[in-house]
Image (cartoon, grey):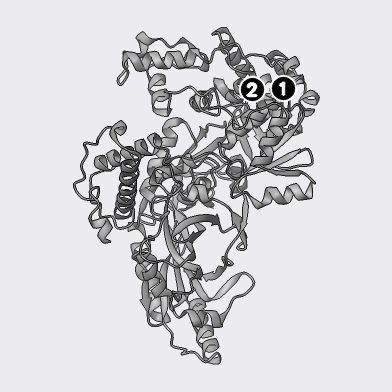
Amino acid sequence: MSHCEESNPYLRDPPLEFEPVEALSATEAERQVELLRAAIREHDHRYYIEADPLIADRVYDLLFERLRELEAAFDLVDPDSPTQRVGGEPVDELETVQHTAPMLSIDQSGDVEAVREFDERVRRELRVEGFDPDTGYVCEPKFDGISLEAVYEDGRLVRAATRGDGREGDDVTAQARRIRSLPQRLRGEPPARLAVRGEVFMPKDGFRDLNRRRLKRGDEPFANPRNATAGTIRQLDPSVVADRPLDCFVYGLLAHDDPDRERPPTQWAELEAFEEWGFNVDARAERVDDIEAAIDYREALMADREDLNYEIDGVVIKVDDIAACEALGNTARSTRSAFAYKFPARTEVTTITDIVVQVGRTGRLTPVALLEPVQVGGVTVSRATLHNPGEIESLGVDVGDTVRVLRAGDVIPYIEEVVEDESGSTFDFPDSCPVCGSPVERDGPLAFCPGGLACESQLERAIEHYVSREGLDIEGLGPERISQLREAGLLDSLADLYRLDVDDLVELEGWGEKSAQNLVDEIDATREPPLDDFLSALSIPEVGAATAGELAAEFGSLAAFIDADPDELEAVDDVGPIVAAKIRDFFDTPENRAALDELLAAGVDPQSVDAAAAENAALDGQTFVFTGSLSVSRSDAQDLVEAHGANATGSVSGNTDYLVVGENPGQRKREDADANDVEVVDEAGFADLLVDHGIDWPPEA
């Protein structure tokens, strides 16, 4: 810890009685912000990497809130601030970026003889290249997560990307900033430019907690931590990433550029340097002298596998000497200096006692096999997913069959094969939803309940979406409160939102007169929503905010939209045959129409689009795409042009009129603009264009 850190009052026994914000000068506020940021970064490192916190969680929360308060009051928000880990503007899409160096794969096998053959080849080729053939190895767990490149300049995180095809990956910088164990600013004396490779993963305990919360909300659980990690790191809304328990181990150096500092000479020295710079490095890594010791390492790690709080599926064995690694070289897709010694799959045989069908939030029906309890990889397994009706038909499985269960991770295990066909039959998948009775619809191997808003299993999530920012933006109704209201019998339909009253709410735990009145007022304010917001809020399949806006502009009123035939729907930009069919199916389903009619009867009156006003809009017929950071959020920029008759879309096409480019723009959109001869303007040019149409920039807050 540096002298500056030692003198920081917010590290140990911090004062928690702060001066009023209004009593501070700008200079005093800046100094306090600087100290709070340094302290919180140290506390994050102690908590998430060293597992040795200096202060209690409650104290940390108070320091964090003080920092956020000062940043807001004195306009001191900085992208590197710890407060920026917990929010962020959603992005339209993930841009493609080129890696600083190829992120290669490695050869792998679960056969010990393949490992010894790897060692023989390494020693033979090193001898030819003039290196000591008896070089040592570094052994590490093979993490079952998502590979990530993180690039730092002058110690600051400037970019993060998924592995992709090894040469290019998705830019997930905004998402990676929300991973607490991945430092935004490095410690010590890192090189001027540094790119590292790590593995993003979700700890087992965090995964279980996340799935419990999803099930409580009516969402489908993630199948395993890797799927949860992949789905999270690619979220377009960084705040979702901040709310999920991602972690990251760093294990490889992709680029090291500094005239004053040499690259570490060995893999082991790299790991030590990573720790000095503040990265999370797995303590299970070891340096061994020969391949037999590496094989022993794998056996010992496999024995401890179930005790780890993260999923691994083998070990990685790497030649330690970096110069020797470079001499060994690479193939087109993999490095010759490393090998993955995989673990065997975890399987056991047991009997199916029943098969139940669960209904997810999208209406997807998932069959789950209930099993005679069996130990698989040290864990008692009593149920396994059968995925979908197509999987059942492929396996030919039914109640009473003896099956092989595979557990490849901390997952709901799945059926690998039928060992004994005791039933002599295949499970008869239901023709109707087990929850609401709606006739089941098939889409290839999948099955869906079309009950929509009338299906209890889908309703709670539909309510959450209706009140969310993507819907009608009703504050004060998060998932926990929605669950509370449903358990109390106050929220059995979307229309019940408009029947809530203060007297009923104050009877519930955690509600006061003020909070109850605020919620009722918030809901009342949405009784006359703009048509596009209302359509977006209804959870119509494939209809998000942009499509809802185009539909509202095209049809003008809810009545006209509801009665539109597929050909009329397909005439709308971005609405093809599949989307048109899903819209028609949604409104042709009696249960959905009944739920909609109930909303209208409860006093909800979506406001029709004024066709004349739209016709006279200053930007009528023009289409804008935004990329990079502007002086205001991109959503505000999109709202502004749409308010004046333009379309704001997320991707560049031949129909795009302008690509507006801010700071750190995505390369893909610029390339698409060049390919489609779309005019590219920076923010200043965009402002001039708006002024020419009588529109002020930036928009008022």
Query: Looking at the rendered structure, which numbered label has been put on residue 553?
Result: 1
Q: Is residue 313 above or below residue 608?
A: below
Where is residue 662, by image quadrant? Answer: top right
Q: Position of residue 22 (x, y in %)?
A: 31, 31
Quarter of the image with the N terminus is bottom left
Q: Position of residue 224 (x, y in %)?
A: 47, 48
Q: Is residue 183 left or right of residue 535?
A: left
Q: Does the CB distance between marks 1 and 2 fall below 8 Å?
A: yes
Where is residue 586, by image quadrant? Answer: top right
Q: Is residue 161 above or below residue 632?
A: below
Q: What amino acid is at disc 1?
A: Ala
Q: Is residue 24 left or right of residue 14?
A: right
Secondary structure under the numbered disc 1 in the rendered image:
helix
Which one is in front, 224 or 485? 485
Q: Residue at x 42, y 45 (%)?
A: 85
Which one is in front, 274 or 548? 274
Residue 342 visible in image: no
Q: Residue at x 40, y 25 (%)?
A: 483
Q: Dot 2 corresponds to which residue?
A: 532
Which one is in front, 312 or 503? 503
- For label 1, the crowd category at 10 Å Cα-Cα, with few meaning under 14, some 14 to 19 and many 20 or more, is some
In this view, which residue lies farthest toward the left? 13
Q: Residue at x 68, y 33 (%)?
A: 648
Q: Position of residue 468 (x, y in %)?
A: 50, 27
Where is residue 471, by image quadrant? Answer: top right
Q: Is residue 469 above or below residue 157?
A: above
Measured in 3D between alpha carbons, the distance from the residue under mark 1 to the one under mark 2, in whole angstroms, is 8 Å
